[in-house]
Amino acid sequence: GGPFMAEDRNMAVVTCSAPVNIAVIKYWGKRDEEAILPINSSLSVTLHQDQLKTTTTVAVSRDFKEDRIWLNGTEDNITHPRLQTCLREIRRLARKRRNSGDENCNTFPTVSYKVHICSANNFPTAAGLASSAAGYACLVYALAKLYGLEGELSEIARQGSGSACRSMYGGFVQWVMGEKTDGSDSIAQQIKPESHWPELRVLILVVSAERKPVGSTTGMQTSVKTSPLLKHRAEKIVPERMKEMTEAIQCRDFESFAQITMKESNQFHATCLDTFPPIFYLNNISRRIINLVHKYNSHHGETRVAYTFDAGPNAVIYTLHQHVEEFVEVVKHFFPPEENGGHIRYGRPRYPPPPLVLP
Ligand code: DP6
């Protein structure tokens, strides 16, 4: 909805949520650090609103003395350059709209008022679970609502965090790399809405909730500088895969969707290993999950599940609803739950794995 305004019209508040997106064609590498322009297009699935998400409240008031931000309950640094870029760009749009003579926005909320931002995730921050994607998408969307802005906002979200532009849309979303130097054609587009493929499911296997040792931004900088594989991938492999993946989604061809997804994940982590010095995001548990998925699929003689890993060891599993129950049982069998003071914790693999009989 629109902004909630206090009686005296001195304060306006908006609260929004934005879900995480999980890339099946990976973004890794920028051609322009400042504007956040990628070296290849990418494609992702935006999760459902009630799963992994960021919730952000933005408020403007005549009484606020300065812009401020709180992340997960703790005040954070408002001078962060990417945050400043998003605020500046949104305010620029708001002024533009006001100056264009649109009567409705001549009055309130006043662009010169300071803003307070309060943002929280319902999942571990910076553990390679796309927290910055949901975070910036949510911030840009909430601010846009506050000032009554519409239109192309993914360009602004992109300048917060590249992958954030894809969380501006639901369902199946591509981030077109674009060609222009000003970045105006480097935007997100929805390929298909969520309703297009209702059987598709996403499982998140949290291997570790710790902060990742190398962040995406610096990781990809080193990769761009040092990895010949990354350059080859961006120029020669991704363009073709974007087409194949789009087709697989359009036809709801899970077999192709799953195979491209796994190959993409593997190639992304291969470029991390090709980076110098190398970057390791996967750990032994991640690799055991990869093996398990391949064994499970070959047991059934068809591709029923796919894994993908971003800048961390946590596995994201894509599957179809009819396979969820069985696959979860298989995961629990090989990674049995441990009782720990009432908390159930999955994770430590069982050595040696006991035999499992599948139908
Ligand atoms: C591995 O969007 O976090 O998740 O643009 O520097 O903020 P910045 O990087 P970010 O990178 C995400 C990388 C990835 C792959 C992907 O989501 O496409």
Image (spheres, grey):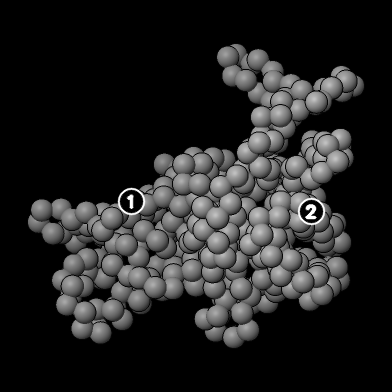
Report the residue at 61% width, 79% height from top. 178
- According to the image, label 1 marks what residue? 15
- The x, y position of residue 354, in whole percent, is 87, 19
Amino acid beneath label 2: Gln
- According to the image, label 2 marks what residue? 259
> In the picture provided, is 93 more to the left or to the right than 4?
right
Query: Is residue 113 or residue 35 the one in the foreground?
Result: 35
The answer for how far apart the CA atoms under marks 1 and 2 are is 38 Å
Which quarter of the figure has residue 274? Answer: bottom right
| Image quarter in which the C terminus is found | top right
- The x, y position of residue 48, in whole percent, is 50, 47
> In the picture provided, is 10 more to the left or to the right than 72?
left
In this orientation, does residue 136 appear? Answer: no
Rendered image: mark on residue 141 = none
Q: Categorize mark 2 by other alpha carbons within 10 Å: few (<14), some (14-19), many (20+).
A: some
Amino acid beneath label 1: Thr
Query: Is residue 212 or residue 312 the one in the foreground?
Result: 312
In this orientation, does residue 100 appear? Answer: yes
> In the picture provided, is 70 more to the left or to the right than 134?
left
Which quarter of the figure has residue 162? Answer: bottom right
**Mark whose residue sits in front, 1 or 2:** 2
The residue at label 1 has a CB less than 8 Å from ligand 1:
no
- The x, y position of residue 330, in whole percent, is 76, 28
Question: Circle 2 sits in a helix, a strand or a loop, which is it?
Answer: helix
> In the picture provided, is 314 more to the left or to the right than 225?
left
Q: Categorize mark 1 by other alpha carbons within 10 Å: few (<14), some (14-19), many (20+).
A: many
Q: Are marks 1 and 2 in contact (CB under 8 Å)?
A: no
| Image quarter in which the N terminus is found | bottom left
- The x, y position of residue 156, in whole percent, is 47, 70
Question: Circle 1 sits in a helix, a strand or a loop, which is it?
Answer: strand
